[in-house]
């Protein structure tokens, strides 16, 4: 096998890394209702430029940090999911919002933008495995379990931005708030000012890391609710004793990093700084030197001194982009194996060209729409987050 410039080895699991094949775990195996340009078409870049130019101010293209470079080059703004949704809301003159991200991000953009704006996701199969780990039915059943245990009235839901519109709406209905990886501490502090317990959805690792690292709780204060077990696999006593009720969900990318990755990179690169995302497992976060959101990772490397060495535990597209942007620093991927977000990478140049050309011809494709009731309560939860001190 040939290593990439970041010394990352491709594995059989990487066959889906560019979204060229069907993802058997995707919740939305939806084909485009038209003919995609061939990936080998040498005119794809020019076609994208021409379609975007024809649309002019009518289109606003958003690119998540984890997107591949061939897509990012056409983004009007780049950022994490919430930043992009807010940027879309701040561009009311744009008739079309083309979101190069995943489904829950496009839903958030639809919630925050005007009724006259239309949000387009270039490939409807671009989902999020973490968001799919908590369905509306499962969470409603969980709330029934908490009610039967006599703790629901003391529990405030806090949902990570990486959740479906349905889960955000559940959170809004039950007096909770949304959080990002940047403001999870503030969100939990607010929630504990409202109640005695928090139901944290859907990423157990961000919830646990924030509670233990930032709020000084112990691991014993946290229990994990498994939606695939009766009663979540927990007794009423466990629920009554817990302060953090963590949903059994995780990010398929960040969950891959282990202590062996940290030990390996420290052995290979003496003096390396290990910087990881808080969606990583607790033991990885505890072994790292720095922990923070995607934006924090970017800012930390921007400010790092020349000649410093960094091992980054987050999605590989971003790590490669950061390595290219900082040739004066040694930046490596924390793991030795490929770790792209396979569903995020389903949005490639052919899908983007197809979406832009369709819009330029007056044909709105792959529009993401959140129904009025769901939007109302999801927006309520998002507004609570925006009001956090």
Image (cartoon, rainbow, N blue to C red):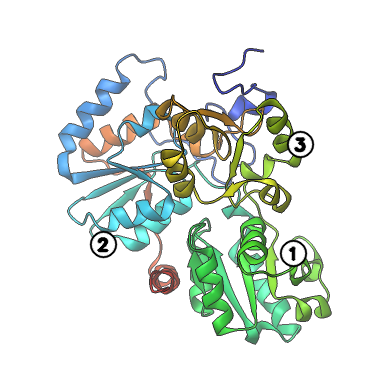
From where the camera sits, is residue 110 visible? yes
Whether 159 is drawn above or below 304: the answer is below
Q: Which residue in the structure is indicated by mark 2?
A: 114
Alpha carbon separation for disc pair 1 and 2 = 38 Å
Alpha carbon separation for disc pair 3 and 2 = 47 Å
Lower sequence index among marks 3 and 1? 1
Marks 3, 2: nearer the viewer: 3
Badge 1: few (under 14), some or many (20 or more) residues near its Cα, within 10 Å? many
Nearer the observer, 78 or 293: 293
Residue 319 at x, y percent in the picture: 51, 33
Local SS, label 3 = helix
Badge 2: few (under 14), some or many (20 or more) residues near its Cα, within 10 Å? some
Residue lying at 69% horizontally and 24% vertically, measured from the top left: 12
Marks 3, 1: nearer the viewer: 3
Badge 3: few (under 14), some or many (20 or more) residues near its Cα, within 10 Å? few
Residue lying at 23% horizontally and 59% vertically, measured from the top left: 116
Nearer the observer, 275 or 234: 275
Residue 225 at x, y percent in the picture: 73, 66
Local SS, label 2 = loop
Q: Which residue in the structure is indicated by mark 1?
A: 224
Q: Of the numbered discs in the image, which one, if any, rests on residue 260?
A: 3
Lower sequence index among marks 3 and 2? 2
Alpha carbon separation for disc pair 3 and 1 = 24 Å
| Residue 219: quadrant of the picture | bottom right
Residue lying at 57% horizontally and 54% vertically, measured from the top left: 131
Lower sequence index among marks 1 and 2? 2
Q: Of the numbered discs in the image, which one, if any, rests on residue 122?
A: none
Whether 206 is drawn above or below 13: the answer is below
Disc 1, disc 2: CB below 8 Å? Answer: no
Local SS, label 1 = strand
**Quarter of the rendering occupied by the C terminus:** bottom left
């Amino acid at each position: 096998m040939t290593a990439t410039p970041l010394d990352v080895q491709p594995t059989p699991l990487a066959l889906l890394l560019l979204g060229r094949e069907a993802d058997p775990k995707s919740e939305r195996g939806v084909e485009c209702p038209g003919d995609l340009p061939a990936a080998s078409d040498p005119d794809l870049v020019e076609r994208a430029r021409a379609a975007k130019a024809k649309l002019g101010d009518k289109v606003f293209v958003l690119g998540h940090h984890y997107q591949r470079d061939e897509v990012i080059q056409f983004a009007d703004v780049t950022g994490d999911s919430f930043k992009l949704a807010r940027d879309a809301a701040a561009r009311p003159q744009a008739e079309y919002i083309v979101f190069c991200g995943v489904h829950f991000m496009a839903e958030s953009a639809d919630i925050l933008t005007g009724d006259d704006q239309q949000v387009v996701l270039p490939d409807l199969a671009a989902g999020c495995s973490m968001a799919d780990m908590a369905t509306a039915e499962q969470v409603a059943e969980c709330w029934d379990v908490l009610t039967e245990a006599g703790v629901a009235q003391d529990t405030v839901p806090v949902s990570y931005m990486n959740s479906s519109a349905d889960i955000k709406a559940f959170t809004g209905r039950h007096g909770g708030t949304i959080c990002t990886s940047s403001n999870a501490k503030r969100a939990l502090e607010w929630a504990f000012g409202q109640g005695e317990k928090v139901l944290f959805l859907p990423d157990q690792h961000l919830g646990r890391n924030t509670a233990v690292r930032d709020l000084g709780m112990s691991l014993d204060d946290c229990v994990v609710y498994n939606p695939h077990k009766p009663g979540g696999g927990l007794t009423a006593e466990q629920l009554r004793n817990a302060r953090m009720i963590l949903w059994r969900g995780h990010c398929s990318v960040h969950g891959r990093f282990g202590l062996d990755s940290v030990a390996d990179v420290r052995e290979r690169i003496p003096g390396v700084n290990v910087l990881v995302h808080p969606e990583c497992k607790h033991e990885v976060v505890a072994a790292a030197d720095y922990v923070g959101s995607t934006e924090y990772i970017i800012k930390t490397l921007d400010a790092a001194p020349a000649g410093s060495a960094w091992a980054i535990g987050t999605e590989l597209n971003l790590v490669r982009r950061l390595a290219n942007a900082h040739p004066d620093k040694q930046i490596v991927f924390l793991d030795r194996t490929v770790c792209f977000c396979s569903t995020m990478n389903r949005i490639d140049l052919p899908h983007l060209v197809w979406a832009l050309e369709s819009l330029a011809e007056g044909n709105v494709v792959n529009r993401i729409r959140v129904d009025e009731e769901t939007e109302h309560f999801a927006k309520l939860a998002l507004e609570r987050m925006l009001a956090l001190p």
